[in-house]
Amino acid sequence: MAKSGIYAFGVIYQTKVVYVYQDKIGHVEKGKISIWIRLSIFRVAGGFMNKRIGFIGCGNMGKAMLGSLVKSKDINNEDIMVSTKSNTSAQNIIKEFNVKATTINSEVTKNSDIIFLAVKPFFFKEVIEEIKDVVKEDVIIISIAAGVTIEQIEEWFGKKIKLVRTMPNTPALVGEGMSAICPNNNVSEEELNYIGKLYNLFGKYEVIAEKDFHAFIALCGSSPAYVFMFIEAMADAGVKLGLPRAKAYKLAEQSILGSAKLALETGKHPGVLKDEVCSPGGTTIEAVIDLEKNGLRNTVISAIEKCANKSKNI
């Protein structure tokens, strides 16, 4: 049997290739099923077709995403490269995450199949000017910047690129982020599915229209700060009532986590879940009435609206 190309032979178990022989023709048999596996330029490991992933910039959000990728074990550390502004930062990244790091953005660009642009929005044009001539045609660019549009990024590159605009939030650090993604017209459905698999490593994601990003930024991108403030206020109340502060924080945090999980897993309307906690003439309804009296609902709506307006005017 004379065939050209790179072939791989492996044992498939629950969608994972357990072992692989490269540069050989491989054969997998089970009962009457016979499967030939052919690999072209991809390497197979842990159910993922490994691509080389680069981060240009690695601030709080970049570190959260990088940390989730490393923790997942689905991406080989040797296939991840990060560029930072200083040698000190690069060494810290190597030490903390055990990935490659450099201070040269073009080096990451040349050695990556997927590039996360994780710098602050006001550095985007400068960084793109630096890397645009070495971006390969099939590379997928992923933006995580608030307020920078697909049209702006395409204009700054000045050529046809595959681009996905995204917005994750910081709970990605613990694999519980909520992200929005929006591809440009050059990204195929298969490529978008791959990006979706990456973002599932950070938590959950939704594909949304670009016009809805301001609402998403206000509702999800910034909402961890709102929730942390609520936790802090709950803990302060606990301390006022005599609880030790460390215990008060733990009690508040687990209550928030459990409530969110209950809403997600039951699919019940939050109002229904609230009513189920409020016994007639009980303690909880007294607290709920006071929250309503002091404008909790309107305060939250107003804050999210102001955040969205700020996003529109960046």
Image (cartoon, rainbow, N blue to C red):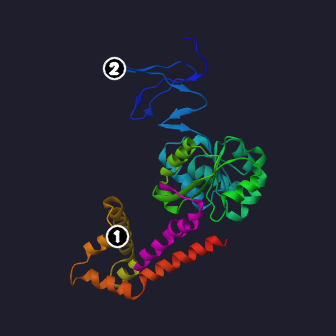
- For the N terminus, the image quarter is top right
> In this figure, which residue is indicated by the disc labeled 1?
270
The picture places residue 190, in percent across and down from the top left corner, at 55, 41
Q: Residue at x 31, y 60 (%)?
A: 266
**Which image quadrant for residue 308?**
bottom right
Question: Can residue 226 be seen in this snapshot?
Answer: yes
From the viewer's perspective, tell me whether residue 293 is left or right of residue 152: left
| Magenta stretch, overall SS | helix
Q: Nearer the viewer, residue 172 or 194?
A: 194
What separation in Å lies between label 2 and label 1 (alpha carbons)? 50 Å
Residue at the extreme left of the image, as rendered: 280
Type of amino acid under label 1 = Pro
Name the residue tied to disc 2.
Answer: 31
Question: Which disc is residue 27 wearing?
Answer: none
The verdict on residue 273 being magenta is: no
Q: Position of residue 41 (x, y in %)?
A: 61, 30
Kindly identify the amino acid type of the residue bearing the numbered disc 2: Gly
Q: Quarter of the image containing the C terminus? A: bottom right
Q: Disc 1 on helix, strand or loop?
A: helix
Residue 224 forms part of the magenta stretch: yes
| Residue 205 spot, x, y in % from top left | 49, 55
Question: Mark 2, residues whose alpha carbon is within 10 Å: few (<14), some, or many (≥20)?
Answer: few
The region drawn magenta spans 204-233
- First in sequence, mark 2 or 1: give its number: 2
